[in-house]
Amino acid sequence: MHTGEEWLKVAAGTTIVCFFLYFFLFGLELLGTAAKIVGGCSAGEVLGDDTNPIGALMIGILGTVLLQSSSTTTSVIVGLAGSGLSVKTGIYMVMGANIGTSVTNTIVAMGQMGDGAQLERAFAGATVHDIFNYLSVCILLPVEIVTHYLYYLTKEMVKGITTEKDDKWEGPIKKLVSPLSKKIIVANKDIIKNIAKYQLDPTNEKGIKDCSEQYGDEAGHCKGLDVNYENCNKGSGLITCDKKSGDCPLFFNEFSTQEEDETAGGVCLFIALVILVICLIGMVTMLQKMMLGMSTRIIYKATDLHPIISIILGLGVTMIVQSSSITTSVLTPLCGLGVIRLEVMLPLTLGANIGTTITGILGALVTDGSEALQVAFAHTMFNITAICIWYPIPFMRNIILTGARKLGKGASIYRLFPVFYILVMFFLVPGVFIGISFLFEADEKAFEALGSVIVIFIAFAIGGIAYWYKYKDGPEKIFEFMTARQTRYETNQSLPEDMAFLKAEVTRLREHTGLADPETEEAEEGADA
């Protein structure tokens, strides 16, 4: 039985955890908003390309990484599906958005770099999302290219369904966090959509060529009128005012330029990252104190849910918070603490993957046309099919778990490994494949030939790396390399302190033994001479 004092401590600890959790969610919301402002122009140009399947997939990844929200990317794709973007291309793009959304919780895992064991578990828990999405695309993208099964299946699903334009559905968690976030900064999502619409069709009345078209009027965004949503919305730049309250946020400037708005977005991005790190450290510290004394067996028993219940729980939570990134980002530090095992993290993540597509369906239901709903249904069916492939059979499931554990081990050996992983998997790989796609779509034969050479080179490089890894002691060499790099990094970090300590010890020993300082002796000998 708990005494009154113990219950008071539990209540106080829970309150503090909830406080940090709220501002952690606020930080994620602010991060997403700031990313839309900093990367919105580029994302709009990227998402507006009606390209080949591989290019569309990579555009979906890169667009989501830039916007830090698969919900926003999906809503843009869904909106474009009725404005010139083919449904088939939209399906490939949402496959990419599925991958891109996993970058957020991978970044959050880096917040536990201070403890190697925690980082290992957290990074493994975060990357089950990445591995599942990448492997699912590797299987289902070729199937979709050959058979178009998602396209025809969802086409049948939307037959006879009509949708009407209405207000956007908003989840309860977003209602709690958004009011505070909108006091600081509000992103103008219309710019992203309108740039993408122009890329698809330059004659589109709502399209704009680039962000600069939103600026340049000397009268300012509000045309000399009172600063509020009604007066400032039509001409606003990347930062706009809150439609519901009518108020303009702290970082809104009616005379701002594009560079000033992007700078403000960068400042908010930095603030969001600081808030996330502080809240993550606070949550982890409090949870550790609250669980102090509890055995690992009790913790595992409390969180050891049936896989189906875990999937349903992940789905339900994601529908409430309206973002799989938020769900997995909150679960990642718990995985780092050992509260949630990797075997439980996987089904929760799979449920979150489905939950975020339900949000897309709800968004599509309040837009005109059936094309948007078809793309949203395709997103859902893609994730359900992927779960059926990878989760029920233990052998297939263990491929994901083993891969995540190896990545987690890599992060614990070399603390900067997560940084390189994110840069390669979410920026370099999509960027290279988008570049190759553009080469193949160019009219000149020379570009196609260059693209073919690059593809052949990449294929040989991948084959060589696979052979080296399998037959030339690749894992051992990687382990040795990463260990050496981490040792060198730690040595460089601690070298100034070690030198200061050694000098202090030498001085103490001289004073204790009465030995003269060599420098002092040389100076005295020089004076005598």
Image (spheres, rainbow, N blue to C red):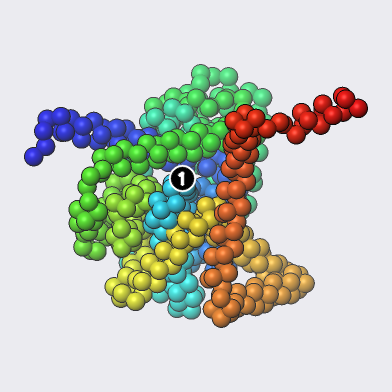
Closest to the observer: 62 or 187?
Answer: 62
Closest to the observer: 92 or 416?
Answer: 416
Residue 235: percent from left, percent from top: 56, 32
Residue 3 position (above or below residue 127): above
- The quarter of the picture where residue 479 lies is bottom right
Residue 208: percent from left, percent from top: 61, 44
Residue 113: percent from left, percent from top: 47, 47
Q: In the shown orientation, is residue 287 left or right of residue 51?
A: left
Q: In the shown orientation, is residue 95 left or right of residue 195?
A: left
Task: Give the quarter of the figure containing the C terminus.
Answer: top right
- The quarter of the picture where residue 459 lies is bottom right
Closest to the observer: 343 or 178?
Answer: 343
Check disc 1 and report its element: helix, strand or loop.
Answer: loop
Q: Residue at x 30, y 76 (%)?
A: 393
Closest to the observer: 211 or 435?
Answer: 435
Residue 172 visible here: no
Q: What is the three-letter code of the residue carrying label 1?
A: Gly
- Check disc 1 and report the residue beneath it: 114
Q: Residue at x 84, y 29 (%)?
A: 525
Q: Residue at x 57, y 54 (%)?
A: 486
